Image: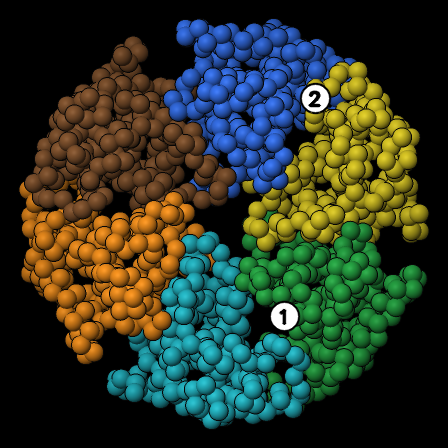
Chain colours: A brown, B blue, C yellow, D orange, E green, F cyan
Amino acid sequence: MRPSGRAPDVMRPVSITVGFARHAEGSALIKIGGTEVLCTASVETKVPPFLRGQGKGWVTAEYGMLPRATHKRGPREAAKGRQNGRTQEIQRLIGRALRASVDLETLGEIMITLDCDVLNADGGTRCASITGAWVALAVALRTLVDKRVIRKMPVLTQVAAISCGLTADGCVLDLDYDEDSNADSDVNFVLAADGGIVEIQGTAEKAPFSEIAFLDMMHLARSGTGILFAAQTEALNAAQSGAPAP
Amino acid sequence: MRPSGRAPDVMRPVSITVGFARHAEGSALIKIGGTEVLCTASVETKVPPFLRGQGKGWVTAEYGMLPRATHKRGPREAAKGRQNGRTQEIQRLIGRALRASVDLETLGEIMITLDCDVLNADGGTRCASITGAWVALAVALRTLVDKRVIRKMPVLTQVAAISCGLTADGCVLDLDYDEDSNADSDVNFVLAADGGIVEIQGTAEKAPFSEIAFLDMMHLARSGTGILFAAQTEALNAAQSGAPAP
Amino acid sequence: MRPSGRAPDVMRPVSITVGFARHAEGSALIKIGGTEVLCTASVETKVPPFLRGQGKGWVTAEYGMLPRATHKRGPREAAKGRQNGRTQEIQRLIGRALRASVDLETLGEIMITLDCDVLNADGGTRCASITGAWVALAVALRTLVDKRVIRKMPVLTQVAAISCGLTADGCVLDLDYDEDSNADSDVNFVLAADGGIVEIQGTAEKAPFSEIAFLDMMHLARSGTGILFAAQTEALNAAQSGAPAP
Amino acid sequence: MRPSGRAPDVMRPVSITVGFARHAEGSALIKIGGTEVLCTASVETKVPPFLRGQGKGWVTAEYGMLPRATHKRGPREAAKGRQNGRTQEIQRLIGRALRASVDLETLGEIMITLDCDVLNADGGTRCASITGAWVALAVALRTLVDKRVIRKMPVLTQVAAISCGLTADGCVLDLDYDEDSNADSDVNFVLAADGGIVEIQGTAEKAPFSEIAFLDMMHLARSGTGILFAAQTEALNAAQSGAPAP
Amino acid sequence: MRPSGRAPDVMRPVSITVGFARHAEGSALIKIGGTEVLCTASVETKVPPFLRGQGKGWVTAEYGMLPRATHKRGPREAAKGRQNGRTQEIQRLIGRALRASVDLETLGEIMITLDCDVLNADGGTRCASITGAWVALAVALRTLVDKRVIRKMPVLTQVAAISCGLTADGCVLDLDYDEDSNADSDVNFVLAADGGIVEIQGTAEKAPFSEIAFLDMMHLARSGTGILFAAQTEALNAAQSGAPAP
Amino acid sequence: MRPSGRAPDVMRPVSITVGFARHAEGSALIKIGGTEVLCTASVETKVPPFLRGQGKGWVTAEYGMLPRATHKRGPREAAKGRQNGRTQEIQRLIGRALRASVDLETLGEIMITLDCDVLNADGGTRCASITGAWVALAVALRTLVDKRVIRKMPVLTQVAAISCGLTADGCVLDLDYDEDSNADSDVNFVLAADGGIVEIQGTAEKAPFSEIAFLDMMHLARSGTGILFAAQTEALNAAQSGAPAP
């Protein structure tokens, strides 16, 4: 039995609300159980120096955690004067995943920055960030089309992310903080709605794990991302129809 | 006529919700018009080096703004590697104001850090931070008494803050972003419920202003903080009775 | 009786000497009792990016304290790698106060940086900095007119600053370090020679203070700045006539 | 045909030399084709604060690249004042991988820092770092036993790492810089000699990739790490017998 | 003819005043021509970690330049967040020179920090700093003996420094800024009153220089430091007799 | 007898190998006894801002030490976020010495950065860096001529550096780490092949030293650099003939 009482293949409740941030071109507040992340998409009509003049766009991400999003207050990175290695690793992952989801050629010389700020943390914040940021990105792209900043909606592969772990209870889906702290190994899967793999990060925390366990976790991840894809779609539809997301 | 259509002495709608942050000993989400700040109080049972062994407590504050809380995305201070002067000025103000509100001797060797993070900005974020942080602090102190970490509730002077400004429309209460950007001068008042002055920061943005204008603004501030004191009390009562704040 | 033996409304001796810094376009060494600040005005014929092409000038300030200006040696900020919050708060205050004193439109696309470096500290360094920097600024503007860099002297409102405090001896003028460390509250007033308010920063260090005490302190400040305005004028006259200031 | 003329499942030549660094408790210079990394293991008899008093050891890693290890000189991170995100991501990966390989309980309160510095770069530097650092770690542990700093050799799972990629030539083993820059996706595998998975980092650079491609790459990685395990063993044997590695 | 009209072996006027800094255990304001440096000695009764428990003292130095000590305003190092290489090179030189002058064993576990801050710069600031800091150090040691913090005056070798240069006018003594900017080479000599060499830093700015030129410069330096030793002694005597220095 | 058994005027074995770094325009791996430094020359076709449009080139240097080049692991400067004073002092010395060796006018608007990274340290790393960097610079200049980036080889004065010291064994040549740590004084000489002095840095570590000792050390240095000049020439010849250096 998992600490939360969930069966191995059961996710925590998911909700995604579009529009929490009043000024951003796109935003989504995503809650997965006790984890809550505010994702915003900010548009600039210029690209980083290495891309200038190539007619291509860029998508990047920054990640942060409010000091008291966690059980114990963590030092504020702005006050310490540097982002720690974990933060940098996570924001690089979010950026790569979202960049892989959008056709940057069609986007044109536009940069979209996805800020993912964790308001409450209970495990799985990097996966929730990717899933929520994808929604914020979709809203921002739609806004750009509506405002005729870009002529045509770029192809946008639907992408979501979920963690799986090998615990004393076997392979389980969607680790919360308690499970994450004690898992033998955990794997973060970023998957596309068409079944493709966008990113895999798997780590043996205690001892190496087997290929079979890995494949079990990938199976669970496919089922979990199915639920996330539905939640993303529902949030986008609700936003478009003017109704609040459930 | 003010840009928002408000009369000179009318505040924007205020709401304060206790408990948004799941892990903090005390938290309050305060909304004043389009400004929204998450305030958390974090307790540690040790004080800074300069206070050790004196039996006194300490209250301090940190302030941050999510990169896209504003019209235009601002650079993330953690990524830049330093907090800018405005941030430092504001967090020092919040810390002084809250420190003046609580009897640090009775608190004992405990440090409470108030984190004020702006989720949406539309003017008045430093004042909203003080008003919300006071509620978070009150909840945290109550928690400490309930858990018997401290034996006795320290005296806590009720404190709230509001900005006033001298604009083309004369002296007005509770500037929003539009007014703040164009005001001739503005004054932030931190006042106690018993009428005492905790902090005053007044600045002539364009030309020196008169003592009469200053006294007019103080008068408006007294009326505005009256509304804030009521909202603070209501939020604390709602939290204690288990009901959600309105 | 105050620790220094002064009556409540008596300032410490003031002296301002123009020209201590050999290379600066304007400079003033101001002494107020045991506090001594070297203020220099440096002129550049370009403005910060946000002002370019608008035909307006800019005035900004930086503040520093020599490591052994104080009773106990403080760490050198350059060696620590960051300016602390107090430094930033003070230099922002000096900049705002001086910016409010000069007509930036007439100045044209010129930036003047006021460096205020404390050589000896005995309380009131931020106020002495503003009072001295105003003299350095006036000298620099005159130099610019003399060298025909600008065609016309911009309007320059005379500005000076002084601290007042509420102590065990009641409201007093011009706190020295001993008084400042023990005051119940203190207020820094930046006033214009025509009576206008440029900036007010008041802080309750121990308990909230009353509006009456505040008004008493403003009354003292008006009398104190009168003496400072005279010292500024005398220093400028002495410099112009080639004679050393007294 | 691959740019280097290698068949898809062919690695570049590998050589590992023990003892390049004269002062380190363990060191290995690893060359894989044109990539060359100096790995050192440094022993300290104290552990980080979070582990003190628990009787457990710690293994951590730092990674660096000499400024001109690459085609174009990169800025020196020490001069810029911060390690970039890529560096932090890589050194966290090396640390996790090596930590998973050694029994930290048997090690006792000892910290081993693995420094991996790239002297020449031609793709695959993070994998070469892990493979070389494992040798340096093994030498250091043997030294600790020889010098009786620890009584018993901790269990040390043999670990090596290799990159695979999906390119225009299909799935290929051991990407060099040319291939790495153009691959559709690449996966870094850290595997144990007994077949277990220690870490997987897979990234779709252009478009999501299929589970079948992923499994193909894992198959190639198993074959590649086989060669690396042999090279590690040979280097350790050569070092022990006093003969130079081939 | 030198730009200043001085003969090759003529120094600029020198004056040293003890006691400018009110709070420091020792201080000296040294002027050499247009160069003016405030040197303070600050005493702490603890030594750096690497010396603890050895019964020996430590002397160290920090150097700074006020932003407008120079012709053109330089950026404030505290604002930039780092001391530049020149500053570090100079403060290391001052520290080494002064450390070599005092018997650290007799001093005991005491640390003296010499802060040298340039108020006006016209060449030769590092040499003036050493010469002035030696006076501040001597005053501080005397103070420690007077206050019975140490029982016995440590042996203090008298040390002073002067620059020489090879210019279009041949070898010259005591370069001012104009000469320093154009010299073919320059050498800073730190010499002891008994003729010993404490430190030599010679640099060919344009082309290598000959051993003969070097020896000529050393000869000039011996004559120049003779004048500095007399000025140091006079300043110390004046301070002791209570009379102001000339 | 010296700790190493060498006579006072005997250097350690020297070897210089051209071409260790695969990508650099010029590189040299220099070994002097147990000290080993990798020197690379990187060419950019642009100069720093202060030189733009003057038709002159620039040569600069950066220095680093691998964390475990030393007996005890030192903290990685990139991780600490700043280069320490010793590093800055050394890299400034290397840059000045090499700049003095080359005719920057003939070079034209080209910048050459010399990176000197210490792989193994046993005393004399700054001198070895200069001697090796000169070879890397010579190779890079030759490459530029061969590739017709510059039309004509700039005059390049041959430059090498060696340390001497005054120890219990009298004046000795080429200090190793043991001697360097215990020397009474040491002097680094950077000399040109034609006998000219490029740079002298002499320091009394314990007590001032005499002019006679200084001249003895300069004599030793002339003999030592003779050996280094031969080794530099041999390495360049070997590289040009395609044969490996001895």
Q: Nearer the viewer, residue D71 or E44?
A: E44
Residue tagged 1: E96
C105, above or below A15, in the image = below
Local packing at callout 2 (Cα closer than 10 Å; few below 14, some 14-19, many 20+) is some
Q: Which subunit holds the residue at mark 1?
A: E
A147, above or below B238, in the image = below
Name which quarter of the figure residue A177 lies in.
top left
Q: Which subunit holds the residue at mark 2?
A: C
Q: Can see residue A93?
A: yes
Q: Are marks 2 and 1 in contact (CB under 8 Å)?
A: no
Residue tagged 2: C207
Which marked residue is nearer to the observer: mark 2 or mark 1?
2
Q: Which x, y percent locates residue F121?
A: 41, 74
Q: Which x, y percent locates residue D84?
A: 38, 50
D218, above or below C190, in the image = below
Q: Can see residue E6?
A: no
Q: Residue at x 32, y 50 (%)?
A: D55
Q: Are marks 2 and 1 on the same chain?
A: no
Say what secondary structure mark 1 lies in: helix
Q: Residue at x 88, y 28 (%)?
A: C8
Q: Quadrant of the C terminus of chain E?
A: bottom right
Q: Which amino acid lies under the numbered mark 2 shown in the image of this protein?
A: Ala
